[in-house]
């Protein structure tokens, strides 16, 4: 079983990561939890070349491997200690992190730099192949964005349509999933369900026709037909509507609603990461989880984010 290793509070954090070497050692330990293996010859024999940016040198074939190559830290010109402080600060903000606050807190000269760093970290928050939701799961869609003119039902022009899945744990909120979708058709909704919910689970939806093909899939489909009920949607699907309320409040509160359609997915990823770990005892564990994903996520560059 993996042994989790992280500072529990900020005092432990500043002692643990007092130097750049401390940061390199921590990345190395997390990245190669079972010991370093040469990517060329698979040898486990190596030695450390210590310079400004330490390298792992294979004792068999001589290949030099950068400790930060292939991670979100690749190519950074800033100290790793600053990256670590930003990650700790980001995970310490219970209501989320804005670029303006990061700029002022960490002394970045340019807002764009703080914004880019946060988006790189958000990019690392979604782990490929993560466990799907299981059990009873409420699913719905919601629009996020400004007011629409002359649109009806599930139509949209400038707002963004987001599919939401909420896992129920003894009638309490469990884990959540989001996905920006182009429309509310079955071609959009059914793949979202398959991607995020374990087969055999009980999927609870309203009576929208986009969910009708679920009856042919390996799911139990429970339909709460809002149009044929005297109760509101928030009563029939209370958990997903609570999450909708929370995410919209978060976007308006932390980011003042200044989230573009283009980058909404990254903000939803951050919210899901935080929400799904909201019961963690220590802030340090959130830092540790983010670090685990940061060292296993391919680097993302500003031109990729803004393009």
Image (spheres, helix red, strand yellow):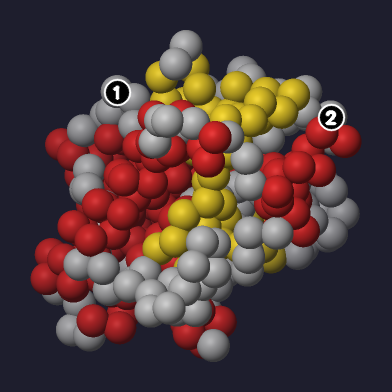
- Above/below status of 240 relative to 145: above
Q: Position of residue 90 (x, y in %)?
A: 28, 53
* Residue topped by disc 2: 218
Looking at the rendered image, the disc whose residue lies closer to the viewer, 1 or 2, is: 2
Residue 250's place in the image compared with 261, above or below, is above
- Residue at the image point whose x is 43% and y is 38% from the top: 233
**For the point 56% across and 82% down, which residue is it?**
304
Relative placement, left or right, of 290 versus 201 is left
Q: Residue at x 76, y 42 (%)?
A: 212
Q: Nearer the viewer, residue 252 or 307?
A: 252
Horizontal side of residue 143 vs 1, given as left or right: left
| SS of the residue under disc 2 | loop
Quarter-of-image position of residue 7: top left
| Local secondary structure at mark 1 | loop
- On residue 281, the disc is 1
Question: How many discs mark residues in the rendered view?
Answer: 2
Residue sitting nearer the eye, 61 or 304:
304
Label ID, residue 134: none
Quarter of the image where the C terminus is located: bottom right
Of residues 192 and 48, the one drawn nearer to the viewer in this rendering:
192
- CA separation in Å, label 1 and label 2: 36 Å
Please, is residue 135 above or below residue 162 in the view? above
Front in this rendered view, residue 131 or 200: 200
């Amino acid at each position: 079983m993996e042994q989790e290793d992280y500072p529990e509070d900020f005092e432990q954090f500043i002692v643990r990561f007092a130097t750049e070497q401390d940061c390199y050692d921590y990345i190395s330990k997390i990245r190669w939890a079972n010991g370093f293996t040469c990517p060329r010859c698979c040898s486990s024999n190596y030695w450390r070349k210590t310079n400004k940016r330490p390298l792992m040198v294979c004792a068999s074939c001589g290949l030099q491997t950068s400790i930060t190559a292939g991670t979100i830290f690749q190519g950074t010109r800033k100290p790793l200690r600053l990256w670590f402080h930003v990650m700790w600060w980001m995970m310490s903000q219970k209501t989320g992190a804005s670029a303006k606050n990061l700029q002022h807190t960490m002394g970045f000269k340019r807002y764009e730099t703080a914004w880019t760093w946060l988006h790189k970290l958000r990019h690392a928050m979604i782990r490929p192949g993560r466990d799907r939701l299981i059990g009873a799961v409420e699913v719905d869609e919601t629009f996020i964005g400004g007011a629409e003119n002359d649109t009806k039902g599930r139509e949209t022009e400038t707002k963004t349509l987001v599919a939401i899945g909420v896992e129920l744990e003894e009638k309490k909120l469990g884990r959540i999933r989001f996905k920006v979708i182009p429309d509310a058709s079955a071609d959009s909704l059914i793949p979202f369900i398959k991607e995020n919910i374990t087969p055999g689970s009980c999927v609870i939806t309203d009576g929208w026709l986009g969910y009708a093909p679920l009856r042919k899939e390996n799911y139990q489909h429970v339909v709460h037909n809002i149009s044929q009920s005297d109760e509101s949607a928030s009563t029939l699907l209370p958990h997903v509507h609570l999450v909708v309320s929370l995410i919209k409040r978060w976007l308006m509160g932390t980011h003042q609603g200044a989230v573009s359609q283009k980058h909404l997915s990254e903000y939803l990823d951050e919210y899901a990461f935080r929400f799904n770990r909201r019961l963690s005892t220590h802030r340090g564990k959130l830092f540790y989880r983010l670090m685990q994903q940061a060292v296993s996520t391919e680097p993302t560059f500003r031109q990729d984010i803004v393009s």
